[in-house]
Image (spheres, rainbow, N blue to C red):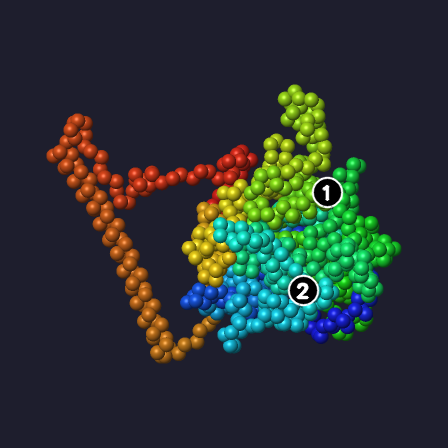
Amino acid sequence: MGVLTVGRPVKWEESLEFLEYVRSHGVIQFVKHYEKYKNIQKDLLFYGDEIEYGLFRLDSEARRASLSLRGAEVREMLEKREGEERRGVAEAGKCTWHPEYGAWMVESTPAEPYSGFTADLRRVETNMRARRARLLAALREDEIAPTVVVFPMLGVPGTAVDEATGRDFPVGGPYAQSALVPDEVINPHPRFGTLTRNIRSRRGANVEIEVPLFKDDRTPAGAESIKMDAMAFGMGCCCLQVTFQCRDVEESRHIYDQLVVLAPIMLALTAATPILNGKLSDHDVRWEVIEMSVDDRTPAERDAVARGSVKADDRLAGGGVRRVRSSRYSAVSSYLCNHKQRCDLHCAARHYNDVDIEIDEKAKAQLVAAGCDELMARHVAHLFVRDPLVMFEGMIAELDDETHTDHFENIQSTNWNSVRWKPPPSPNPANIGWRVELRTMEVQLTDFENAAFTVFVTLVLRVLLSFDLNVYMPMSKVHENMRRAHERDAATKPNFFYWRAHLAYPKQTTDCPSARRGAPEECSVHSSYERLEEMSILEILAGKSGYYPGLVPLVLAYLDHIGCDPETERIVRSYLDLIVKRASGELVTASKWMRNFVADHPEYRRDSVVPDSVAHDLLRACHDIGVGKVYVPELLGVEPIAPVVKENAYNVQLARVHLESKSDTLAAILERYAERARLVQRRTEVITLLSLRSAELKDLQAELAAINAELEPSPNGYGSPSPAPSLYSRSSPQLDALPKSKGSASDLLGLDNLGWNPSSRSGSQSST
């Protein structure tokens, strides 16, 4: 979340008379802004990530976890320390901190974006680790900040505690009017409370969130779902988002379309949300929860029956009675690119826009009259079927449409889609270009994983652009993939996601495998360039048969083609290894690991309810995994994560220390380190003596063995018996009896034939 507006927000009832003004002038502002920046060019790639953290307090004696509602306080501390750090650190090593919806949340980004050089692929994880270390340094002794998607006990009594009194905050309040959570969990900045109240006011009721309950052995009969009633359950979710600055507006539109197709796949691969409101969900991801948590549609907009019995309110978009298919938070509904057209239109976005979407006809007419093409006009006009949700006094009619984009951003920034197309900001002193943001990925437990997915998406986009490929499919299939991505274990299910059989135009039919075998001239694979198949994510990543190459081999081919340096390639291979093994099931998703943790916990009663003590232990484990204290091979692979510690959070200046030469302090320091030097020297001497004595002992053992052989020859006369295994031997019967590895995903797939032999990642895990 960016910079927050300072001022008094306008109440919903007062804002009704200004809704039409903001919608109309929002379109005008976009048109003027587009005209100003449509020719901006950026030769180099820049990209950046956003990671959100939750702050939790652990009561080790009671074995209970609660929210730490100090997000604003912690962020202020971090910003102040970051300002002090700026004096002596290169921009590449800095980070920034931002507010988020929850009072227990903070968001971090690198202070400067990563650049389009291979060395910056290594910088991603280093910067993420630095941010985690700095956050640790700002926490109290009883606080943790694991990168989990959701606080698993949100909505359970006793998890939102007043620090001053030690008692629970009473549920409810004027903003959310929730029966489960208090308003105190909302960020105290007036924007967030107003946003919550206005969504509820426009809707005419509290939001209704319902997800299927996971049925365990002792789940009570009739328990079917998990129900929640406040925006905090959705907007309190943490995620990993990645934004790319593109070369120009045309490239941004093309990348937008490709990310729309990739978004469901990345959602399933990063699944990390198995627990909601203290219960096990039958879905693995957060997306639908957020969809329902910000659904401000009126009854008539949601339901055809209500539409026929309600009078239109001309102040609302569409009179408040126009059918609106989805919530403000949803999957993208239409492709945007219009410049990749070829003779057969197979790369034209409009060719695949098979989903009916609502558009504001007045807005579209304004856009077309201003010179916007059909697809862009359709995209922007679809945004404007929504009303603005938060206005501030003095920032409505007072804004100059020539220089401000606040009214456009009011609509744009509250259309939370799976991918966001982002025009340059206004004002724009840094001359930032057109950007695209992928928003579906769930935050992972470690910085290694978060860096792996960030780097992977970055490289896939470079592959599609460099090799002139595309992943277009009908938008209706993208929506189906989004639905399927919610299911448990979607990342490993076979034949589960729709995907293109070809990423590029097929070769001549005589070059296809069937033709080479003497089959008919046109095989079933090459019969249609647009043919879709149901594939597993493993096949999407690693390839299928001889006709679909897979995204990972294409990434490796790209790295080889550009001459990637060996160190970066080694680290990237470790990232790709993690992702492919997750798709194969050799490694589990965070969601699967958390389910297993709960199921194996002795205090879980197999009734779908997560006890407080189990949630406490789970959050502690998640924190320990994230900082490298606990090694979980089934989640991360064979190499442990190097520890992240708060002592390494900031650089220490080589300061000139002034101590009086006769002071007791100086004498004590010198005495302490003189003693330390003496102990170090003695340790070296002891090690040397041990080495010499070990050699002498070895010689004596050999002499004894020879004497025994002379005195006690073996019964068959053919030499002495074999000596017993040495305690220091690398091989022993016990070691030989250990079970061997069953083989990696790359072994099973034969990916070594593609030159893919992932190496150890230990060298990439530098201590922050």
Q: Nearer the viewer, residue 73 or 648?
A: 73
Picture quadrant where residue 298 is located: bottom right
Quadrant for the N terminus, please: bottom right
Q: Nearer the viewer, residue 500 or 126?
A: 500
| Residue at image location 26% in from the left, 45% down from the top | 727
Left or right: 723 in relation to 553: left
SS at badge 1: loop
Looking at the picture, which amino acid does disc 1 mark? Pro
Looking at the picture, which amino acid does disc 2 mark? Asn
Picture quadrant where residue 718 is located: top left
Left or right: 309 in relation to 709: right
Query: Mark 1: few, some, or many residues within 10 Å (few <14, many ≥20)?
Result: many
| Residue at image location 48% in from the left, 60% down from the top | 611
Q: Nearer the viewer, residue 465 or 387?
A: 387
Q: Quickly name the residue at label 1.
A: 474
Residue 263 point in image, percent of width and height: 65, 49
Residue 510 point in image, percent of width and height: 69, 25
Left or right: 464 in relation to 127: right
| Residue at image location 56% in from the left, 63% down from the top | 154
Q: Quickly name the residue at label 2.
A: 206
Residue furthest left as drawn: 711
SS at badge 2: loop
Residue furthest right as drawn: 369
Residue 62 point in image, percent of width and height: 43, 67
First in sequence: mark 1 vs mark 2: 2
Residue 393, compared with residue 231, is above or below; it is: below
Q: Can residue 130 be seen in this view?
A: no
| Residue at image location 16% in from the left, 40% down from the top | 704
Task: Tell me the CA gap for discs 1 and 2.
Answer: 34 Å
Left or right: 62 in relation to 372: left
Residue 121 point in image, percent of width and height: 58, 51
Judged by depth in the image, the label closer to the viewer, 1 or 2, is 2
